[in-house]
Image (cartoon, rainbow, N blue to C red):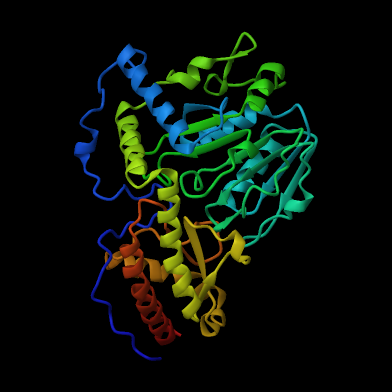
Amino acid sequence: MKTIEKPTVRPNNPRFSSGPCTKRPGWKPDALKGALLGRYHRAPETRARLSFALARTRELLKLPDGYRAAIVPASDTGAMEMALWSLLGARGVDVLGWEAFTRDWVTDIVEQLKLKDVRALLALYGELPDLTQVDFDRDVVFAWNGTTSGVCVPDAEWIAADRKGLTVCDATSAVFAVDIDWTKLDAATFSWQKVLGGEAQHGILILSQRAVDRLENHTPPWPRPKLFRMTRGGKLNEALFDGSTINTPSMLCLEDYLDALAFVESVGGVEGTIARSNVNAAVIADWVERTPWVDYLAKAPATRSTTSVCLKIVDPEILALPPKLRDEFARRMAVLLDEENVAKDIASYRDAPSGLRIWTGATVEKSDVEALMPWLDWAFAVTKQAVAKAA
């Protein structure tokens, strides 16, 4: 095999993790110096700070009139659990699952909530379920971006505008990275620690008026923990959507979120962060096009994520290896690149097919993605030579 010379230019920032994701360019701890630490979270000043963060979120995302946003516990997962446990049960449910986290929502709905009228529309890694089979007379639960497979829905055109059910969307690797038609989503969730590179543990829950109507007119038959309750006396607890929180938030993490929102504004708003993600993803697309040993895990180009780019090794000699060696190959590449301080945390998710997963969200610099590509070729060649010697 031809020897590939070791690259000399390393990414300035080797952090390509798909969550928590890298901080915005130039971030330093000084960005948090305005945090209201050691203060009661319901004091006027702290409540105002939380309310301001929600107002900026609504403004930057250009949410439609009447849409509400709340800061909730336990990251995107907590926000999705709140939505599922509070909104479902009034209608039958179609839930889409095609990778690790989307299948978690199938498990929650079928095994935990134990809803009887559920259709689980499933697909293998690399594919989407058949979106034409979704019934919008029912509630629909899906993710915009399947982070562990790099497979996303292509757009919102498949969602019925005149739907009778609610759409509940896990949008955590999509918000601030793709153009979302918010009128097609009734409940959407995301985490600061994805596209914005914020600190983890807090989620954002966005509700349409249709979702609010469901909350006020439907009482689920199952008990709901305090962390999931969004109504009082049969009416929406509006305070949650104006800076009050169910439990104690981290004002340090809040300050970091405000810093991330300032970054969004500095690059031209949501259009700017979308553009940054697209440019980064395009670097990998150009490289994949000219590189014979690698391909996307996502089969259809329209479903390829622009944030969590998942790749598979298609070199015939590697595919012909014994299963254990074949499955370990990409992970050995990832370890090698980590040791070189070139790329951190780019092995595929533990339940996903063997491969590489490279985050290209808005906080990643294009120059770092460009610098990484030759290192991927080098790591492939070095690992292939090592495997050949071992065999």
What residue is rendered at 24% in x and 49% in y?
A: 26
**Left/right of residue 103 with respect to residue 307 in the rendered view:** right
Q: Count the marks: how many? A: 0
Q: Is residue 245 visible?
A: no
Identified at 49% across, 36% down, the residue is 62
The quadrant of the image that shows the N terminus is: bottom left
Q: Position of residue 109 (x, y in %)?
A: 68, 37
Residue 287 visible? The answer is: yes
| 163 left or right of 23 in image | right
Residue at the top extreme, as displayed: 233
Which x, y percent locates residue 40? 31, 15
Residue 306 in picture, x, y percent from top left: 49, 57
Vertical position of residue 251 compared to residue 6: above or below: above
Q: Nearer the viewer, residue 293 or 182?
A: 182
Q: Is residue 139 left or right of residue 245?
A: right
> Which one is nearer the viewer's eye here, 65 or 215?
65
Q: In the depicted view, which residue is nearer to us: 29 or 110?
A: 29
